Image (cartoon, helix red, strand yellow):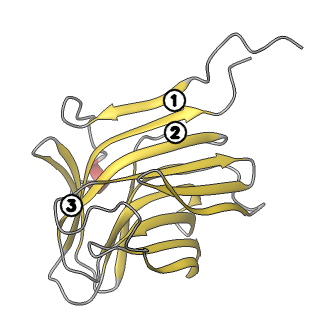
Amino acid sequence: MPPPTANPPTLLNVDYATEQPALPDYVTDVAHYADGTLRIASTLSDGSQGIAAAQLVFSDATVQASVSLAEGTNDDLYGIFLRSASAQMYYTFAVSPVGHVFVACYDNEFIPLVSGPLDPDIPFGHGLGVANRFQVVAIGPSLTFILNGTLITAEIVDERYREGYLGFFVHHGITSPRAELAAEWIQVKGVFPPG
């Protein structure tokens, strides 16, 4: 069998320092652009906010994004969501500014799969305004989560989540007035060559 002749396609590639796509009207109260980043805020105590990176449904893909927490405290979380078939069904991959990692399925409530402090030897940018790189490989019902090049958890299999929207996620804890995520860039590539 001959090797494939085409590389997997780039499905989405946005650098917010140079591109600032129009935001839908329904998100302008929580999202805006500042300092070459997309900002998404939550002021709900113990509440989450997510904004899709594009109005596209993705299935087999790899996603990576550079994200930081621009405003908030140690009990706030920031990162990405994916495989969102509806507002009440998705996976999230997030961290706190002090290195607490959180991978969870959301189906009307969070079902944590990974929740705890990162090992001190894992590369991680601590504090506000320090970006970390989130990566997820999503193939069929399988999901693999990688932070700054380090595998966090491999091959979660969930038949309910085979495709959906993806984007940025911020969870506001209970101690700060608000939590605001800053996304520098996002890239989504297909897993398989076209055709």
Image height of 38 relative to 7, above or below: below
Q: Residues within 10 Å of mark 1 (few under 14, many from 20)?
A: some
**Which residue is drawn at the image coordinates 17% and 83% (left, top)?**
176
Image coordinates of residue 178 in percent, x first then y, are 18, 76
Amino acid at circle 2: Leu
Viewer-proximal residue among 60 and 148: 148
Of labels 1 and 2, earlier in sequence is: 1
- For mark 1, give the secondary structure: strand
Image height of 65 relative to 145, above or below: above
Instruction: Give the spatial CA distance, label 1 vs label 2.
Output: 9 Å
Of labels 2 and 3, earlier in sequence is: 3
Viewer-proximal residue among 98 and 72: 98
| Location of residue 40 (image quadrant) | bottom left
Between label 3 and label 1, give the one nearer the viewer: 1
Q: Which residue is mark 1?
A: 11
**Which residue is drawn at the image coordinates 47% and 74% (left, top)?**
102
For residue 29, the mark is 3
**Which residue is drawn at the image coordinates 41% and 53% (left, top)?**
148
Image height of 21 relative to 129, above or below: above
Let me know if residue 57 appears in the view.
Answer: no
